[in-house]
């Protein structure tokens, strides 16, 4: 039997196998929030946190309405795109809407979104961030961090896109197998942190196709690392969010550097990224101290 960590109690609550009581209801809501699982948690304990659930359901409807509008815009201009880090085993309210898009389609997508009131906040080599009334859209040409590309966005758009429905609209999104690989790469290479939501994606949708895709996209090390961390979390040996140790980070990034020519070629961009920001020290400290991402 797994040790009864707070993460295990949260997981069992989500699955309807546990009913927190008293102060534990509030503590687990904090854990759920850190793991991007607040909405499904509140739906399970609605009788204790009814007002909070009402607010979170309103946020979810707001997020989905805005998402549907962005989809409508992208479909209207004929952009080649895919919702990215969007499909999850549980409904959730994200801090932003991530979209993979073909580089040639970025200008017309930005222009069309600007006509709906969105403003460009950041324009970087592989990402354009737009915002409107607190709703944030990140347009990625390649999954990247600090101007370093860790996965081929064009290949994902060619191999791994399927139609889904979002608020009654036809939309394009990454396949579930691709979401597993993207989730692993994002958690391990970029965030150096694993959430319970990441584990739920891995447990629900990892199959032979996902493993093959991870190998094809150069993310097999990330998927293996995520799988092992999630196994420890599921056994009650670790809590989520789980922060990767410096040794593991060094190991996976070194292997990525050696084996991935695009990652290696763009790695030098980290220096340009760092020297171009006066607040780089504050950013690094904040990243080190954070409890989630």
Image (cartoon, grey):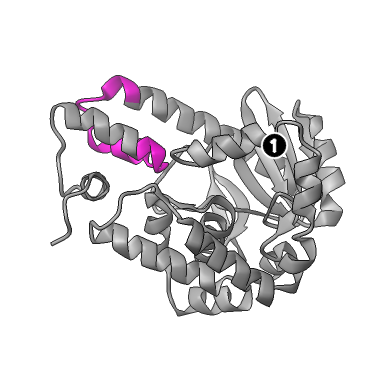
Tag count: 1
Residue 84 image position (x, y, % from top left):
60, 53
Q: Nearer the viewer, residue 127 or 4?
A: 4
Q: Main secondary structure of the magenta part?
A: helix
Place residue 220 in its image quadrant: bottom right
Q: Residue, x 25% and y 58% (percent of image)?
A: 237
Q: Nearer the viewer, residue 226 or 118?
A: 226
Residue 74 image position (x, y, % from top left):
74, 46
Q: Quadrant of the N terminus?
A: bottom left
Q: Does residue 11 lie above or below 163 as drawn?
A: above
Place residue 143 in its image quadrant: bottom right
Image side of residue 192 versus residue 100, left or right: left
**Residue 17 visible in the shown view:** yes
Q: Residue, x 24% and y 38% (percent of image)?
A: 44
Q: Does residue 65 lie above or below 220 as drawn?
A: above
Was residue 247 drawn as part of the magenta stretch in this picture?
no
Residue 288 image position (x, y, % from top left):
52, 41
Image side of residue 186 versus residue 8, left or right: right
According to the picture, the residue beneath numbered tag 1 turns out to be 280
Q: Residue, x 20% and y 25% (percent of image)?
A: 48
Callout 1: few (<14), some (14-19), or many (20+) C-alpha neighbours within 10 Å?
few
Q: Residue, x 37% and y 42% (percent of image)?
A: 37
**Residue 79 visible in the shown view:** no
Image side of residue 2 versus residue 96, left or right: left
**Residue farthest along the top direction in this orientation:** 51
Place residue 115 in its image quadrant: top right
Looking at the rendering, the stretch of residues picked out in magenta corresponds to 32-52
Residue 286 image position (x, y, % from top left):
56, 35
Helix, strand or loop at disc 1? helix
């Amino acid at each position: 039997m797994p040790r009864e960590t707070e993460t295990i109690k949260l997981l069992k609550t989500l699955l309807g196998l546990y009913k927190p009581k008293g102060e534990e209801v509030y503590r687990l809501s904090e854990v759920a929030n850190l793991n991007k699982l607040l909405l499904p948690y509140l739906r399970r304990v609605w009788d204790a946190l009814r007002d909070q659930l009402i607010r979170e359901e309103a946020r979810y409807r707001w997020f989905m309405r805005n998402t549907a509008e962005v989809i409508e815009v992208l479909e209207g201009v004929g952009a080649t795109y895919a919702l990215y880090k969007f499909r999850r085993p549980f409904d959730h309210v994200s801090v932003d809407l991530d979209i993979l898009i073909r580089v040639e389609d970025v200008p017309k997508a930005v222009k069309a979104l600007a006509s709906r009131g969105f403003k460009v906040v950041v324009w970087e080599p592989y990402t354009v961030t737009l915002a409107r009334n607190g709703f944030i859209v990140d347009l990625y040409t390649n999954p990247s961090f600090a101007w370093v590309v860790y996965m081929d966005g064009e290949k994902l758009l060619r191999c791994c896109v399927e139609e889904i429905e979002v608020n009654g609209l036809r939309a394009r999104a990454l396949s579930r197998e691709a979401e597993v690989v993207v989730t692993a790469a994002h958690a391990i290479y970029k965030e150096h942190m694993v959430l319970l939501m990441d584990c739920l994606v891995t447990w629900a949708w990892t199959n032979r196709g996902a493993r093959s895709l991870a190998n094809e996209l150069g993310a097999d090390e990330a998927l293996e690392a995520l799988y092992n961390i999630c196994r420890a979390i599921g056994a009650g040996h670790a809590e989520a969010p789980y922060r990767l140790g410096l040794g593991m980070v060094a190991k996976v990034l070194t292997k990525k550097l050696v084996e991935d020519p695009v990652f290696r070629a763009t790695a030098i961009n980290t220096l340009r990224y760092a020297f171009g920001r006066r607040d780089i020290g504050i950013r690094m400290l904040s990243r080190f101290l954070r409890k989630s991402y």
